[in-house]
Structure formats: C-alpha cells, structure tokens
Image: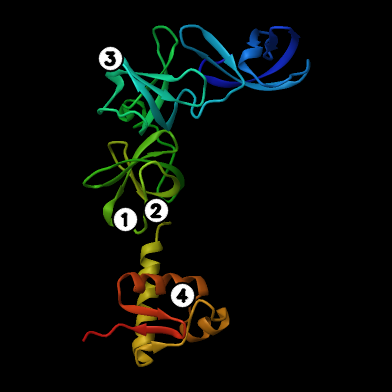
Amino acid sequence: MENGKINTLDVARKDQKGFYLQNQKGQEIFLSSEETELDLEVGSSVEVFIYKDRERIVSTRLPYAQVEEFAFLNVKFLTEQGAYVDWGLEKDLFVPLEEQMETLEVDSNYLFFVYEDEDNGSIRGSQRVEDFVFVDKIDVKRGDEVDLLLYRESNLGMNVVVNNQYQGLIFKSDIHKEVEVGEQIKGFVKQVREDGKIDILLEPLGYKKSVESNTDILLKAIKKADNFLPLTDKSKPEEIKSSLGLSKKAFKRAAGHLYKKKLIEIRTDGLHLVTKK
C-alpha cells in the first residue's frame, strides 16, 4: 500500500465503525466510516487515498494531486511555519516555509509539487519545481506531443512542466495564441537541450512554415484579384481548392493570420485587402 498514492483495494469485511480493506498481498488497512460516504459491500473494490499527516489516513476522497505530481492549488491560510493549501481532502496540504519560493497570499493559486517527507513519511507540498523535475534520461524527443502545465511567465516566455516530469519553456516568439498561467494544454517538443530542459512549441513542427506559405498564397491571390477575393468561411471546400489550391482549414487559418496582422478585412462578401491611405 503506497503512501501518498491512490490505491485500489478489496473490501474484506465491515463493522459499525467502517471497512477493512485488503490488497493483493493480503495486507489490511481500516477505512473509517467518517472518511467515506460510500456504502461498500464485502467483495467489492474501491479506490482510496492513503496518506500520513500526523497519523495515517485512509479516505475515498481523492486529492487533486498525489505524490510525485504537480498541481495548481489554492492557499487556505498561512502560519509562521508554512502554508496550508486545498488539495481536495478534509485535511489541507502543508507547505513548509522553506519550500516556498515567493510570498504566498490566501485565496491565490500556485503551482506545488506533492512529495513524501523522507524523515517521517508525511505528505507535503513544495514550490521548488527545479528540485523535482528530471534533467536526464528524458524519454521525449523532437516532434513528440506532450502534456503541459503552464506555471510562470518570464522575460523569455512561458515556463511549463512537461508530462509532469520535465521542465520546459515556450519562447515568446513561439507563442501565437493566448495562453495563461495555470492552463493545462498540449504542446510539441521543439528540442531537448543539453541541460535537460525542453523547448516547446504550441503547434506541430512545420506548422509555422505551413501557415506562412499558405498566407503568402492567399495574400497574392487577393492582390491579383484587384484586392478582393469573394471567398468566406461559408464557401464550399471545392471552390476554395479550385481557386487557391488550399484546403478549407488551411484557407481559414491563413485568412485569420492576415486579419490579425491587419492586412485584410473579413466581410460577409469576402476578403478585402487593407490599403494604405
């Protein structure tokens, strides 16, 4: 039975105070009725979270993050020793003062890593991202799709946790849409650097070149047609293909790119080139 983890156990027997659960090795643990709202039957299986605070607690309430996971959590209250944050359980997660990287504020969300204290087995939280990410034996490569947790903006761009294991960065020059700290989104590996950090793109490799190429095709077509092209997002795919040689998806993406750069106006009758007065 793993401390700080979600365990799937079998209900071996029950009494008025709660349930006795077993793992496949026959090890047994008690689940108090106070820690579950479920009416469990003997022989059934149940997911429980087992963790140690001052004492060992078994609960069917599952946390927002378990040991060895990152998550954005809300600060409930502060003490001289540290902070207590909401991680989805009745007892809040304690973040020692020495594990904080900034001045925390109550009711604000921050990125924390959940870890097990090696000295006493208590489950704690930390803001020290760099202490808990892997910088060697990285099992992602250029072009791979990855899970991202956006946690801090910097002068270079957006810092992210990659696949809950690695540290990454999306450079400002590679951010082409609105992103916010706290978001969980997909991204793509641009490169794995020698220091173990990972450069990330928000689109697949080759996307930028593809957009630029299609944008150039569309812009030239509008200019060639006397600054007006009677194509819209309601045009048939065959019509767009015949006129531009682009798919409807590529057309809409290119049109959106030109619109953001204020080179065209998108009207109900089609695309109009913005001419300088």
Which mark sits nearer the N-terminus, 2 or 3? 3
Mark 3 vs mark 1, CA separation in Å: 41 Å
Earlier-in-chain disc, 1 versus 2: 1
Q: Are marks 2 and 3 in contact (CB under 8 Å)?
A: no
Q: Position of residue 273 (x, y in %)?
A: 33, 84
- Residue type highlighted by circle 1: Asp
User: Which one is in front in this view, the residue at disc 3 or the one at disc 1?
Assistant: 3
Q: Which residue is mark 4?
A: 251
**Mark 1 in CB contact with mark 2 (< 8 angstroms):** yes
Total count of labels: 4
Quarter of the image containing the N terminus? Answer: top right
Instruction: Kindly identify which residue carries mark 3.
Output: 80
Residue matched to label 1: 174
Observer-nearest of 69 and 190: 69
Q: Position of residue 261 (x, y in %)?
A: 30, 71
Residue 127 vs residue 49: left or right? left
Counting residues from the N terminus, which is met first, the one under dot 3 or under dot 1? 3
Rendered position, 238 above or below 206: below
